[in-house]
Image: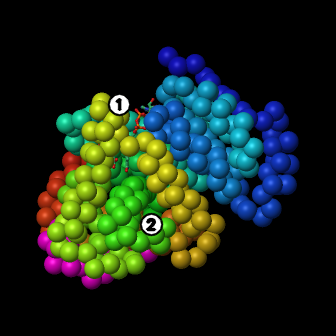
Amino acid sequence: MFRCMLVRSSSSAKQSLMRRNLSSGSVPERKVAILGAAGGIGQPLALLMKLNPLVSSLSLYDIANTPGVAADVGHINTRSEVVGYMGDDNLVKALEGADLVIIPAGVPRKPGMTRDDLFNINAGIVKNLCSAIAKYCPHALVNMISNPVNSTVPIAAEIFKKAGMYDEKKLFGVTTLDVVRAKTFYAGKANVPVAEVNVPVIGGHAGVTILPLFSQATPQANLSGDVLTALTKRTQDGGTEVVEAKAGKGSATLSMAYAGALFADACLKGLNGVPDVVECSYVQSTITELPFFASKVRLGKNGVEEVLDLGPLSDFEKEGLEALKPELKSSIEKGVKFANQ
Ligand SMILES: NC(=O)C1=CN([C@@H]2O[C@H](COP(=O)(O)OP(=O)(O)OC[C@H]3O[C@@H](n4cnc5c(N)ncnc54)[C@H](O)[C@@H]3O)[C@@H](O)[C@H]2O)C=CC1
Ligand SMILES: O=C([O-])CC(=O)C(=O)O
C-alpha cells in the first residue's frame, strides 16, 4: 500500500496565485501532469517542463519517489507550482484539471529486446493510467511515450472509447525523438547547421515502422542513395543504438526528455492559439489505410487541427512505406485486442 504523498513547492495557494499573476502576464494557466515522473525520462522531463513558461502547474505522479523529485524540481525559480503525487489514491489529484498529460510510465528495453517485448508489462500500466485520465481529466491532451507506442496509443484510444470520452484529436504518440535523431544524423552527413535542419518522420515508432523522409529534408543536400539508406537505417535503429550503449541500464532518457518537452511545448502552443504549429506525431489517421499513423500534424486549440498529407515520396521511401504497413497493422491490432479483452 502506498502512503499519500504530496509535496508542494509553495506555502499557500494565495501566494502562488499572486506569483503566477506577476510572472506570467496574460499567458494562460496550464496544468501539465507527468505520469512516471520519477523515472529515467520522467525526471529530466519534469526539469524541462519546469523551465517552460507556458506551464503554470506541474503535477508529478509516479508509484515511487515523486516527493523527492517534486521537492527538488520545485525549488527552481520559474513560473510553475510543482506538486508530487505518489500511489493510486493520489492519481485523481495528479490528474484533476490537467490540460496535458504526458505518459513515460513503464519499463524500458534491455539489449536484445524489441519494443514489443515491453507490451506485456506496459500495456497494463497504460490501460490503468488511461482509465484514470478518462475519469479525472477527460478533456486533456495525452502525449504517450510508453512503449511500444505503436500499440499503447491504440490501447489508449480503446480505453477512452469504452469510457465514452474518446476524442481522436487529443491523443498523440510521441515520435519526436525519431525526428530529433533524423535531424542530427542528416546534419552530420549533409554538413549543414543542425539548427536549420527539418526532416519529417512518418509511420510508427519501432524499427522499420520508423520512416524518415530525407527526400523532403531541408536544406536539401545531394546525398547518395547509399548514404540515404544508411541514414534511414540509423534513424530506425536509433533507440537500439542507445539501448546497446547503455548496456542493460535502460534506453534513451535524456534525448527522449528533450524530445518529449519539445512536443509538449508544441501542444501547449497549439492550445494557446499559436498559429501554424506543426510536428510529426502518431495519431488516428486516414492518410493511409492504417487507423493510426505518424505524419506531420498541425496542432491547435483542440489538439490535432489537421493531419497533413505525406507529400511526394522517393521510390525508396515508397518501398519503405509499403514495407512498414504489415508490422504497424499487427501492432495496432494487438493493442486493440488487449484493450477489449
Ligand atoms: N516514445 C519514445 O520515443 C520513447 C519511449 N520510451 C519508453 O518510455 C518508457 C519509460 O522509460 P524510462 O523512463 O527510461 O523507464 P524508467 O524505468 O526509468 O521509468 C519508468 C517510471 O515509470 C514508473 N511507473 C511504473 N508503473 C507506473 C504506474 N502504474 N504509474 C505511474 N508510474 C509508473 C516507474 O516507477 C518509473 O519511475 C519505456 O516504456 C520506454 O520504452 C523510451 C524512450 C523513447
Ligand atoms: O528504443 C527504445 O526502447 C526506446 C525508444 O523508443 C527510443 O529510444 O526510440
Position of residue 98 measured from the top left corner of the image (x, y, whole percent): 60, 49
Residue range in magenta is 306-321
Which residue lies at the image location 13% right of the left edge and 64% below the top edge? 323
The amino acid pointed to by label 1 is: Lys
Position above or below: 157 against 72: below
Q: Which residue is mark 2?
A: 194
The amino acid pointed to by label 2 is: Val
Which residue lies at the image location 65% right of the left edge and 32% below the top edge? 72
Tell me the distance, in whole angstroms, between the alpha carbons under discs 1 and 2.
29 Å
Q: Nearer the viewer, residue 170 or 17?
A: 17
Q: Which residue is mark 1?
A: 249
**Dot placed on the residue nearer the N-terminal end, 1 or 2:** 2
Farthest-out residue, top: 1
Q: Is mark 1 within 8 Å of ligand 1?
A: no
Disc tally is 2
Which residue lies at the image location 51% right of the left edge and 32% below the top edge? 38
The image quadrant of residue 190 is bottom left
Position above or below: 32 against 63: below
Disc 2, SS: helix
Which residue lies at the image location 21% right of the left edge and 37% below the top edge? 113
Q: Is residue 297 visible?
A: no
The image quadrant of residue 46 is top right
Relative to 180, is 275 on the left or the right? Answer: right
Farthest-out residue, front: 191
Position of residue 168 measured from the top left corner of the image (x, y, whole percent): 41, 62
Disc 1, SS: loop
Relative to 240, is 59 on the left or the right? Answer: right
Q: Is mark 2 within 8 Å of ligand 2?
A: no
